[in-house]
Structure formats: C-alpha cells, structure tokens
Amino acid sequence: MAIAKARIAHARAKSQTQQKERHLQEQQLSLFSA
C-alpha cells in the first residue's frame, strides 16, 4: 500500500510540474507574440 501511495503521489507531483512548465511556456509565447 505504501509503495502504491508513493507512486500515486509521485505521478501527481510530476503532472503538476508539467502543467506549471506548460503554463510558463504559454506565458512566454504570449509575451513574444505581443
């Protein structure tokens, strides 16, 4: 159970960081296009 929970937490954190990176990239693109 502990391993499964750790894997879920890791996957969740990974997806959150990917979303943050994507958001930053979108901000940079909007700055360049402006």
Image (tube, grey):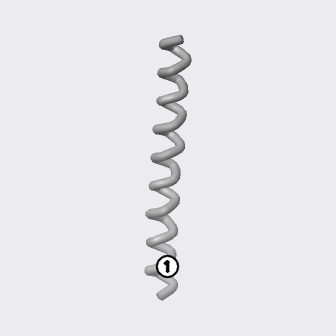
Q: Amino acid at mark 1?
A: Ser
Q: Position of residue 10 (x, y in %)?
A: 48, 30
Task: Name the residue tied to disc 1.
Answer: 30
Q: Is residue 21 above or below residue 8?
A: below
Looking at the image, how many numbered discs can be counted on the residues?
1
> Which residue is at 48% across, 62% downward?
23
**Local secondary structure at mark 1:** helix
Q: Position of residue 9 (x, y in %)?
A: 48, 29
Q: Nearer the viewer, residue 15 or 1?
A: 1
Q: Quadrant of the N terminus?
A: top right
Q: Is residue 18 above or below residue 27?
A: above
Q: Is residue 26 above or below residue 30?
A: above
Q: Residues within 10 Å of mark 1 (few under 14, many from 20)?
A: few
> Which residue is at 48% across, 21% downward?
6
Q: Position of residue 27 (x, y in %)?
A: 45, 71
Q: Is residue 29 above or below residue 13?
A: below
Q: Residue furthest front?
A: 1
> Which residue is at 45% across, 72% downward?
28
Q: Residue furthest bottom?
A: 34
Q: Residue furthest top?
A: 1
